[in-house]
Image (tube, helix red, strand yellow):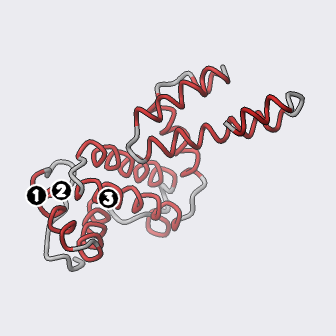
Amino acid sequence: ERYLDTIEQHPENSSIESGYGNFMVDAVVTLYSFGREQKAADYYDRLRERFSKSKYRAALNQFVLRELAGDISSATFDQGQATVQGFLFRMYYALALGDFERGEAFHRLAQQVWRKYMNQVKGSEDRRGLPPFDQMKRTMLNRCLNSFPEILANRLRRAVEEHVPMADAEVGAGTPP
């Protein structure tokens, strides 16, 4: 709302409008990344209404993936690994809370980011490649089991056992593999 108020007060300043557009893009990606797909869709509709660029004509998930891909295409090893680990952490946290739909969304994002990054480093995987996706899942699962409060760790164990296709990492006592 502040952006819109400022744009109204300074219509001659196109950089404010541009800043608002960038803010909205980031809002859409962030909301989608956190499993808030309906809210992301609402913001994406606002973005499309205000800016009729062809860039915003794709379906929501395609738009988000394209934006994430742009970020990943210039990512360092540490940035790529941190992004995948972040989505995996959010997946396991959502599973521990019983929010399986959000967990699915984070799993898909983690996997897509991992694939995109690995495609970017093709030919230099030995130097810049991430660990195999399943290994990253096992490592993050164990980190979560070790760091979550006991009640959440127990819920996570049960959730992973019940939702094998998405969270097919081995459920151990919480010690790293």
Question: Looking at the picture, how far across and down is residue 110, in whole percent?
Answer: 38, 52
Instruction: Choose the circle earlier in sequence order: 1 or 2.
Output: 1
Q: CA distance from mark 2 to mark 3?
A: 11 Å
- Which residue is situated farthest in the right direction here? 12
Q: Residue at x 16, y 57 (%)?
A: 160
Q: Which quarter of the picture shows residue 167?
A: bottom left
Q: CA distance from mark 3 to mark 1?
A: 18 Å
Q: Nearer the viewer, residue 99 or 70?
A: 99
Provide the residue designation for mark 1: 161
Q: Is residue 30 above or below residue 51?
A: below
Q: Is residue 31 above or below residue 146?
A: above
Hey, what amino acid is under mark 3?
A: Phe
Q: Which mark is on residue 133?
A: 3
Question: Looking at the picture, how far across and down is residue 32, in whole percent?
Answer: 44, 41
Hey, what amino acid is under mark 1?
A: Glu
Instruction: Choose the circle earlier in sequence order: 2 or 3.
Output: 3
Q: Which quarter of the picture shows residue 38?
A: top left
Q: Nearer the viewer, mark 2 or mark 3?
A: 2
Provide the residue designation for mark 2: 168
Q: Residue at x 21, y 51 (%)?
A: 98
Task: Identify the image quadrant of the C terminus.
Answer: bottom left
Question: Looking at the picture, how far across and down is residue 80, in whole percent?
Answer: 49, 60
Q: Nearer the viewer, residue 173 or 72?
A: 173
